[in-house]
Amino acid sequence: MRILGYLLVAILCLYGAAAGVLAFYQRRLIYPGAFMAFPHDDAVPAGTEAVTLTTADGERLHGLWSAPRPGCGVVLSFHGNASFPGPHAARFAGSPWREAGWGVLSIAYRGYPGSTGSPSETGLIEDGFSAYRFVSEKAPGAPVLLHGHSLGAAVAVAVAESRPHLGLYLEAPFDSMSHVVRVHFPYVPSGLFLLDTYRSDLRIAHGSAPVLIVQGDDDNIVPDALARELASAAGPRARIELIPGDHVSILGSRDGEAEALFRGTIPVPCGAGR
């Protein structure tokens, strides 16, 4: 009986140690792009220019910017947790977006290559607001489409909660970081230690603009159940498309459809009256 007790104590100690390690390193797991030397191309994509944004709390963010044609919209794009702004900037500065007059701004979050600071939920949301402000100053009156992939979708939803926008274009989004943690670490009490909860399910419930969600059916990072929960929280204004692919291969798969959908929500047609 005593041996059984010792074994139980040992198991509890190991469990506690493992949970403690996860708690201590949680931001390294949530924001790996800020802590690990992921290979990435820092070249400025064709059709864009490198810019520097200053946040309200004094951080300096690297961004890639392309102005819209007069009267046209801007895609404000937020990348995933292990990515960088270049791929999204190149994507939205190209077909079919550029032909339709869209501009784009894609930023590197605080702590990510090219930007100062350290990442956190509060910080990334402030980065999102700073990016929105940059667009408003560079293209006054231009309608904004908020785009995000994975973690970036959570930033886009947070910005959408309090800023005017054409809609949300979300790829592989999740309803909350707590849900993501439960999926990958089912035996860890995330509610006790999780610093950054990203409750997109609560934030998205307050909006009225259209939401397009694109989700891969073979995504083992953000399973489709989490995207479905987010769509449910958004209500009837949300449309979710489950398509073949994983967490990354789906990117851009529905750009043609998304561009047409959100261009149709611009009150004055792009280029009208020129």
Image: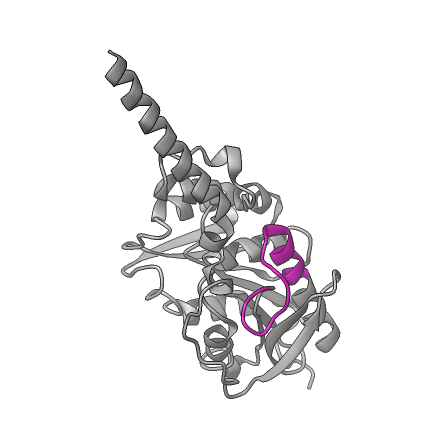
Residue 237 is situated, as x and y percent measured from the top left of the image, at 52, 49
Asked whether residue 90 is in view, the answer is yes
Residue 166 in the figure: left or right of residue 7: right
**Residue 102 belongs to magenta span:** no
- Foreground residue among 21 and 223: 21
Residue depicted at x 31% and y 52%: 220
Residue 205 is situated, as x and y percent measured from the top left of the image, at 57, 43
Q: Quadrant of the C terminus?
A: bottom right
Residue depicted at x 55% and y 67%: 112
Residue 54 in the figure: left or right of residue 171: right
Q: Is residue 6 above or below residue 40?
A: above
Rendering colour mode: one colour
Residue depicted at x 34% and y 48%: 223
Q: Quadrant of the N terminus?
A: top left
Residue 131 is situated, as x and y percent measured from the top left of the image, at 66, 67
Residue depicted at x 39% and y 39%: 18
- Foreground residue among 249 and 193: 193
- Foreground residue among 211 and 173: 173
Q: Is residue 90 above or below residue 242?
A: below
Disc tally is 0
The residue stretch that appears in magenta:
111-129
Task: Locate residue 135: give its quadrant.
Answer: bottom right
Asked whether residue 232 is in view, the answer is no
- Foreground residue among 1 and 244: 1
Q: Is residue 178 above or below residue 89?
A: above
Residue 69 is situated, as x and y percent measured from the top left of the image, at 63, 83
